[in-house]
Amino acid sequence: MKQQTEHKNKLATKWLFTKNRSCSCTMPGIWRAVSSCDGCAVIFHGPDGCAHVATLMDLGSQYRIIGDRQNENVDTVPLIASNLQERDSIFGGTDRLRDCIAYVMKTWKPKCLVIASSCVAGVIGDDVEQEAEEAEATYHIPVLCIPYGGFLGGEYSDGYFQTAKLIMERFILPQPIAPGTVLLLGDQMGPCGQYAREVKRLLAGFGLEVKWQFPGYVPFDQWKELSSASLLIPLSYAGQTQGGLEKTAAQWETMFGTPAIRDVYPVGWQNTCAWLRKIARLRQNEELGERLIRQEEKRLADFVASILPVTKNKKAVLGIGRGPRWYNPAETLNTIQRMQMDITAVVLFDKLTAEEKDSVTTAIEQWKTSNTQHFDFPIIVDGNYRQWLDEADALITTDEIMDHPVKQFFIPMVPLAGTDGEIILMRTIYRLLCRYGNKGGIAYA
């Protein structure tokens, strides 16, 4: 992560980072996969700091939910660190792990125990799997061991999906289908997050009820029932790393025969319509699907009509600093067009590689070509875009700009879902434009 300096007419973005792959640890992923599964307990075989990282991650998630004006209604299970010390790197830490397991069993009496191993445990060679087998024989409860060794064995998603895979293979058996029930797959801020809330609202129009969200939010006693769901809905979005979620959804279909809505996700209006139509086909009621789409379209149109007196003909510059792997500019361009704002320029920030700039440029040109309205705005790649910001009413951007009074809307890192997501974006931009005078500032959805 680095801060860009300002040169001549070039403006500086506040923070720049390029992410080719995740640099996260497997242990928080393991934790997140069972963090709200009542009846479980999790042991981090490592220093106390490892558990602290997971706690901070959960705290950030809680703040996000509070900021979204939602009440968090899920509790987390016990998370305990074996508290490896410096001396354990010489003499081994299996005794600490054994004592920690005994303490957890005496204090919380879990129905299932999950053990994640840290980098320290991996380096010193502690046989965590053997300890897990002995604990299962001693306490007569299932003990899952995911011995990745922190950073040594992979990243967050590896720990998350491997834990889900072990649960699927060990605990879930084919069950009779319960008509009208839905299983959500993935996290996306949990049941209180915007994605899950919007999916539940849209599915209700088909008479479908979301009963579970797996992994992470299903009590241990209900794991065996999960295969009774009549539909599997992965919570993801195009453009992001799909590997783990796609593979898990495909494995679920193979193991339990549950149809899954894959390859299309309700992010952006066009994708939401395609997603609804796919569900309608599975439900063999395409007429209902089109009726729901018309209802959502009217809701969207009614909201747009209410903000047009402020947004119409306002000049907007789109700033892009995320590559095509992480961001699809067509969705933002559609939103700006829907608000009838005048797109005066698209800026590609210096943080993008040459290949990323080419890919983003191609995506923008394709959007222009497929649009019935004619657009001739420039795509600026040389960093000299100050004059465009001087004339703009708002900058819609993936990166904050420093030392310029233009009003800025920060495009969410995690896209919002469905019609509600589109309305949230437009409402935030509308309120930004309503601010008195040209005082700048930045707004977040």
Image: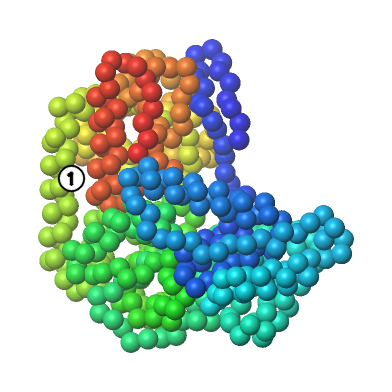
In the displayed structure, 56 sits above or below 79; it is above
Residue 274 figure quarter: bottom left
Q: Outermost residue, top direction?
A: 8
Q: Which corner quadrant holds the C terminus? A: top left
Question: Of 55 and 341, which appears nearest the observer?
Answer: 55
Residue at horizontal 44%, vertical 85%? 173
Quadrant hosting residue 199: bottom left
Name which residue type carries label 1.
Answer: Leu
Q: Position of residue 431 (x, y in %)?
A: 26, 30
Q: Is residue 117 above or below residue 426?
A: below
Left/right placement of residue 266 relative to residue 60 reads: left
Element type where label 1 sits in the image: helix
**Residue pictured at 30% horizontal, 68% vertical:** 210
Colour scheme in the image? Answer: rainbow
Q: How many marks?
A: 1
Residue 296 place in picture, x, y as percent = 17, 52
Q: Quadrant of residue 320?
A: top left
Q: Is residue 445 left or right of residue 433?
A: right
Residue 155 visible at all: no
Question: Alpha-carbon neighbours of circle 1 within 10 Å: few (<14), some, or many (≥20)?
Answer: some
Above or below residue 237? Residue 36 is below
Viewport quadrant of the N terminus: top right
Tell me if residue 189 can be seen: yes
Q: Identify which residue is drawn at 58% across, 80% down.
A: 142
**Pointer 1 residue:** 300
